[in-house]
Image: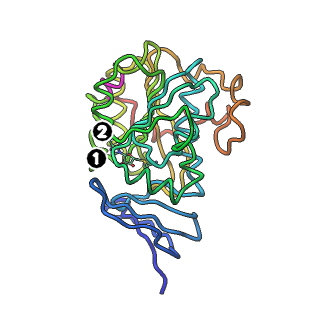
Amino acid sequence: MELFLTENQTDDMRLSVRTTRVLHHEQTAYQELVIVETPQWGRLMALDGFFQTCDRDEFVYHEMGAHVPLLTHPDPKRVLIVGGGDGGMAREVARHPGVEHVDLVEIDGRVIECCKTYFPQIAVALSGNPKVHVHVADGIQWVREHEAEYDVVIIDSSEPIGPGEGLFTADFYASVYRCLTGDGILVAQTESPWVNADVIRRAYRGIRQSFPITRLYTCAVPTYPTGLWSFTLGSKKYDPLEADPEARIAALGRLRYYTPDVHFAAFQLPGFVAEIVAAE
Ligand code: SAM
């Protein structure tokens, strides 16, 4: 019998992936966690039915979430990742030789443990990397309790429902502003322009209330709804369009999506995407 794992991406649209094995299935204290083996995408993890990460395309999201802000800031040393329990964002951040300290704050310890077991290449930085410090805690509270401490904060959250809901509010972005240093940068994953325009609008408006430079950028992630994905960047001082990614990219090793050209191209928005944030 053929078995498919299906994500209800919206009330009217689904994505089904054929699975050959269920590797793990549990209800954690926060969410339903499923990890399956798939012929198309390798291993894939879903939380509460939403596809989060998979072997074959994870590099797109993680490279674009990490290297855009880290190569916009001229000298990032301390980085906070909120969420990101799969470890892919930490792996990319840890590539930067100048980064000295990474705090990863994930609310669900089971996500971390299961990803270490089933996604060793993604979770590689979560054990034994002296720069990376893993904390099982609520990112909202963590951000509230830290002031002027980080050069870059990356919000690698799940969807704005369940435990991730509070990570998309203007209040939260204001506390991220306070926990950044004087020239710090925030990047938040902000979902799909096709089916989550309201999420993007709300996040963009919230970030803009605190940060003088606010910019939306996109990348192509085939297992996320519609494949077109967005991040919103808020910066106190440095404009990503004036960055010099060429200068430090060689030290990062082999990348598969991010290039200096992609850095700038990602901010060139198709008309309908630019319109989502034009009035904000
Ligand atoms: N790349 C993914 C995506 O866009 O679908 C996100 C992956 S990562 C696994 C998202 C993580 O955020 C989940 O493991 C979830 O437990 C965590 N998370 C949700 N709310 C959180 C909170 N308030 N504090 C810390 N982590 C949170």
- Left or right side of 199 for 91: right
Name the residue located 32 percent from the left edge and 61 percent from the top edge.
32
- Magenta residue span: 173-177
Please name whichever residue, 10 or 122, is drawn nearer the observer in this view of the structure: 122
- Could you tell me which secondary element the residue under label 2 belongs to? loop
In front: 275, or 198? 198
Residue 234 rendering spot, x and y as whole percentages: 43, 25
Which quadrant holds the C terminus?
A: top left
Residue 275 in view (yes/no): no
The image shows residue 253, relative to residue 221, as above or below, that is above
Please state which of residues 79 and 48 is positioned toward the viewer in this rendering: 79
Q: How many marks?
A: 2
Q: Are marks 2 and 1 in contact (CB under 8 Å)?
A: yes
- Is the C-beta of the residue carrying label 2 under 8 Å from the nearest atom of ligand 1? yes
**Amino acid type, callout 2:** Asp
x, y percent for residue 169: 28, 34
* Amino acid of disc 1: Pro
- From this viewpoint, is residue 182 visible? yes
Q: Is mark 1 within 8 Å of ligand 1?
A: yes
Kindly give the residue lying farthest to the top in the view shown.
182
- Mark 2 vs mark 1, foreground winner is 2
Q: Return the residue at label 2.
A: 138
Residue at mark 1: 163
- The rendered magenta stretch, by its main secondary structure, is classed as helix
Real-space Cα separation, disc 2 to disc 1, in angstroms: 9 Å
Task: Determine the residue positioned at 46% across, 23% down.
Answer: 185
Picture quadrant of residue 13: bottom left
- Badge 2 or badge 1: first in the primary sequence: 2
Question: Is residue 222 positioned above or below 152 on the image?
Answer: below
The x and y percentages for residue 117 are 51, 58
Would you say residue 46 sits in the magenta stretch? Answer: no
What is the crowding at mark 1: few (fewer than 14 residues within 10 Å), some, or many (at least 20)? some
